[in-house]
Image (spheres, rainbow, N blue to C red):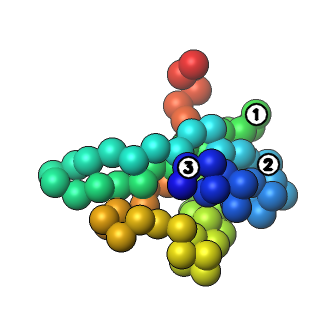
């Protein structure tokens, strides 16, 4: 699923000058979350995350790529300095 999501959204968010750095599933308070980490050579501000999130969520919904047991999608930027 992770690779499919990267392939699905990469081309669509490229005009925003962001890319998917990582996709992984985690569990928080008993709920499975799909985490999508974005990165860029520029600063990613809240407006850019919001714009990218709209695109990503729309694609995920259209293509039904989530497993039935994943309840939430969390999209955020990689902190600068992370390796």
Residue 64 visible, this orientation: yes
Q: Residue at x 72, y 54 (%)?
A: 7
Name the residue beneath numbered marker 1.
Answer: 41
* Mark sitting earlier along the chain (2/3): 3
Q: Is residue 11 left or right of residue 51?
A: right
* Mark sitting earlier along the chain (2/1): 2
Q: Residue furthest left?
A: 29
Q: Residue at x 16, y 54 (%)?
A: 30
Task: Report if the CB atoms under discs 2 and 1 are less than 8 Å apart.
Answer: yes
Whether 47 is drawn above or below 21: the answer is below
State which quarter of the image contains the C terminus: top right
Q: Secondary structure at mark 3?
A: helix
Whether 75 is drawn above or below 44: the answer is below
Along the line of sight, which residue is nearer the eye, 55 or 27?
27
Q: CA distance from mark 2 to mark 1?
A: 8 Å
Name the residue beneath numbered marker 3.
Answer: 2
* Mark sitting earlier along the chain (1/3): 3
Q: CA distance from mark 1 to mark 3?
A: 22 Å
Q: CA distance from mark 2 to mark 3?
A: 21 Å
Q: Residue at x 61, y 57 (%)?
A: 5
Label 3: how many residues lie within 10 Å, few (<14), some (14-19) or many (20+)?
some
Residue 44 visible, this orientation: no
Name the residue beneath numbered marker 2.
Answer: 17
State which quarter of the image contains the N terminus: bottom right
Tell us which disc is closer to us: 1 or 3.
3
Along the line of sight, which residue is nearer the eye, 67 or 48?
67
Q: Residue at x 55, y 49 (%)?
A: 2
Task: Report if the CB atoms under discs 1 and 3 are less than 8 Å apart.
Answer: no
């Amino acid at each position: 699923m992770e690779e499919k999501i990267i392939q699905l959204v990469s081309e669509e968010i490229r005009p925003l000058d962001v890319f998917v750095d990582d996709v992984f599933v985690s569990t928080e308070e008993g709920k499975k979350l799909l985490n999508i980490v974005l990165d860029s050579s520029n600063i990613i501000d809240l407006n850019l995350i919001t714009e990218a999130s709209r695109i990503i969520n729309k694609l995920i919904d259209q293509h039904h790529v989530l497993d039935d047991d994943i309840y939430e999608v969390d999209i955020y930027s990689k902190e600068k300095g992370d390796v």
